[in-house]
Amino acid sequence: MQGFGPFGPFGRVARATVAVFLAGAVLALSGCATPEQRVSRDPFEPFNRGVMEFNEGVDRALLKPVATAYRQAVPGLVRTGVSNFFGNIGDVWSAVNSLLQLKIGNAFESAMRVHVNTFFGMGGLFDLASEFNIERHKEDFGQTLGRWGVPAGPFLMLPLLGPSTVRDTLAMPVDRRFDPFHDVNPDSSRNAFYALRLIDKRANLLMVGDVLENAALDRYTFTRDAYLQRRRAEITSDGERDRDRDAGQTPKLDEAPAGSPRAAPARP
């Protein structure tokens, strides 16, 4: 498993930082859009709805049955260990992105989580860091771009990958390249990790999916609005917490993070 140390991605911070500054090109292009274009969150709605129908068909035929069988066959304690393991791996990239966003405290806490859970939690199978009240800060490169003012762009529903925005879609290759599993060899082992992570994630969403399916609402609109709201909160809330923590104020989710332009209404 070449380069599969828990702290391996920290050695690649320089390359990831370069990608942040390349995102300036996206900012420049965004200035060419008309006000009407910037207001619309979902100009691709007909296409997005078609993709969502395709994704739901794949989920019904493959992902949900596999996730259901996994949940029924695997003991809860083992499933929790699997989720903890992948969460520990995710904390590595979260620490890097917190550092890129100059959230030094969050980066330190994420690094501490990796250290505690890796060395005292049997490689991350046990989430001891949460027991020690070390907070988890989930960050990805899309959030890093948003932190530095890159607009979210229109909502997109991606085949098999689900809800996204133009900004988050452009960030995906960076997230994938610096995924610790990217360097796992041979390919069969790497793909096995990817498959298990996908099944674990879908199994954890089974109850939510059932509620959504049975609810009398437009699932597409609900999914879109929930995703955009969550992404906006992920970008703005951390910045407001960092700024307001010292002032003893309650963070506000409708303001841009400190050090970045104010978020537009359509930006998650």
Image (spheres, rainbow, N blue to C red):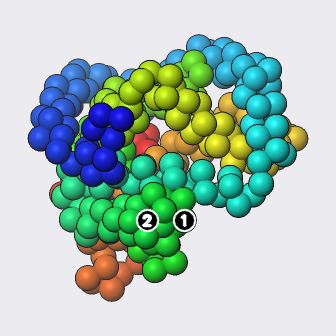
Q: Position of residue 206 (x, y in %)?
A: 76, 44
Q: Secondary structure at mark 2?
A: helix
User: Is residue 54 rendered to the left or right of residue 229?
Assistant: right
Q: Quadrant of the N terminus?
A: top left
> Residue 171, can we see it?
no
At 21% across and 65% down in the image, what residue appears? 104
Which residue in the structure is indicated by mark 2?
A: 117
Please say if the residues under marks 1 and 2 sit with CB atoms less than 8 Å apart: yes
Specify the amino acid type for callout 1. Answer: Phe
Give the alpha-carbon distance from disc 1 to disc 2, as whole Å. Answer: 6 Å
- Residue 140, quarter of the rendered image: top left
As displayed, is residue 41 above or below residue 104? above
At label 2, the amino acid type is: Asn
User: Could you classify mark 1 by the number of other residues whose Cα lies within 10 Å: few (under 14), some (14-19), or many (20 or more)?
Assistant: many
Q: Nearer the viewer, residue 156 or 254?
A: 156
SS assignment at label 1: loop
Task: Say above or below: 239 vs 35.
Answer: below
Q: Quadrant of residue 15?
A: top left
The percent position of residue 12, horizontal first and vertical second, equals 18, 40
To which residue does mark 1 refer?
126
Place of residue 181 in the rendered image (x, y in percent of width and height, measured from the top left): 40, 35
Q: Residue at x 30, y 55 (%)?
A: 95
Q: Which mark is residue 148?
A: none
Residue nearer the viewer, 194 or 148: 194
Left or right of residue 61, residue 12 in this image: left
x then y, percent, for residue 262: 28, 51
